[in-house]
Image (cartoon, helix red, strand yellow):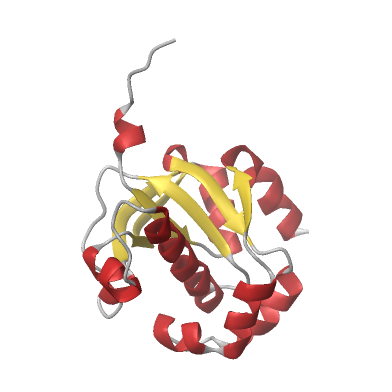
C-alpha cells in the first residue's frame, strides 16, 4: 500500500451549504457550475471565532457557519465537505465568516456531508431566516436551539444519492 498523500488529500477543506435541489443536481450531473458559495478556513473566519487555522476548532467553526448559511438559502441544514485545489475570491459581505466563491464543485471533490436530524424543524426555522445574513441568523434563538439540541449528522459521500432521493419523496 502506498503511503503517498494525493494532491486532493492536501487540498484545503471547504464547507458548501446546499439546497436539496442543488445536491440533487450535483448527484445527477456530477458537478455544480460556479460560482458556488462555500465557507473556508480563512484568516477572517479564524479571527472571528478566535481559532487557529490548522485546528479542528477552525473546521467546526466553518461547518457551523455553513450549516447556518444552508438554513438561510434552503429549508434544511445540508453541508458538503469538499477538498478543492483553490477557492476563489472572498464572497462580498461575508468575508469575516470565511465565505468564498468556488469556480464550481465537482462531486469527486466531496468527501462527506452533514445534515440535521430533524428536517421538519429545520424547515420552520429556515422560513424565519429567508432574508437574513449569516450574522443575523447566527444570533437567532431558533438557530441556537437547533445547534445545541440537534447536532449535525455526518454521512459518507456514498450516501448522498440515497439521501437526495429520500428528500425528494
Residue at the far right: name it: 169
Q: Nearer the viewer, residue 38 or 165?
A: 38
* Quadrant of the frame with the N terminus: top left
Q: Is residue 162 left or right of residue 93?
A: right
Q: Nearer the viewer, residue 82 or 142?
A: 142
User: x%, y% of residue 94?
Assistant: 31, 77
Q: Which residue is depicted at the point 41% across and 60% down?
A: 57
Q: Which residue is depicted at the point 52% across and 59% down?
A: 79
User: x%, y% of residue 95?
Assistant: 26, 73
Please identify the quarter of the rendering in which residue 34 is found: bottom left
Q: Nearer the viewer, residue 44 or 86?
A: 44
**How many dots with numbers?**
0
Give above or below for 24 relative to 6. Answer: below
Q: Which residue is depicted at the point 56% across and 51% down?
A: 113
User: x%, y% of residue 124?
Assistant: 69, 83
Give above or below for 108 relative to 95. Answer: above
Please identify the quarter of the rendering in which residue 51 is found: bottom left
Give above or below for 29 relative to 99. Answer: above
Q: Is residue 116 left or right of residue 112?
A: right
Residue at the far top: name it: 1
Q: Is residue 3 left or right of residue 157?
A: left
* Quadrant of the frame with the C terminus: bottom right
User: x%, y% of residue 134?
Assistant: 42, 80
Q: Which residue is depicted at the point 54% across and 86% down?
A: 129
Amino acid at each position: 500500500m502506498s503511503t503517498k498523500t494525493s494532491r486532493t488529500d492536501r487540498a484545503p477543506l471547504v464547507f458548501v451549504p446546499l439546497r436539496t435541489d442543488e445536491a440533487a443536481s450535483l448527484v445527477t450531473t456530477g458537478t455544480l457550475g460556479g460560482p458556488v458559495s462555500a465557507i473556508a478556513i480563512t484568516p477572517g473566519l479564524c479571527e472571528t471565532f478566535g481559532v487557529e487555522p490548522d485546528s479542528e476548532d477552525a473546521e467546526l467553526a466553518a461547518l457551523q457557519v455553513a450549516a447556518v448559511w444552508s438554513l438561510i438559502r434552503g429549508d434544511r441544514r445540508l453541508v458538503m465537505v469538499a477538498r478543492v485545489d483553490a477557492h476563489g475570491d472572498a464572497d462580498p459581505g461575508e468575508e469575516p465568516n470565511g465565505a468564498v466563491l468556488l469556480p464550481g464543485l465537482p462531486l469527486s471533490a466531496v468527501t462527506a456531508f452533514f445534515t440535521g436530524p430533524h428536517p421538519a424543524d429545520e424547515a420552520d426555522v429556515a422560513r424565519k431566516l429567508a432574508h437574513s445574513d449569516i450574522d443575523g441568523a447566527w444570533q437567532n434563538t431558533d438557530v441556537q436551539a437547533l445547534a445545541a439540541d440537534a447536532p449535525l449528522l455526518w454521512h459518507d459521500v456514498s450516501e448522498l444519492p440515497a439521501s437526495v432521493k429520500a428528500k425528494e419523496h
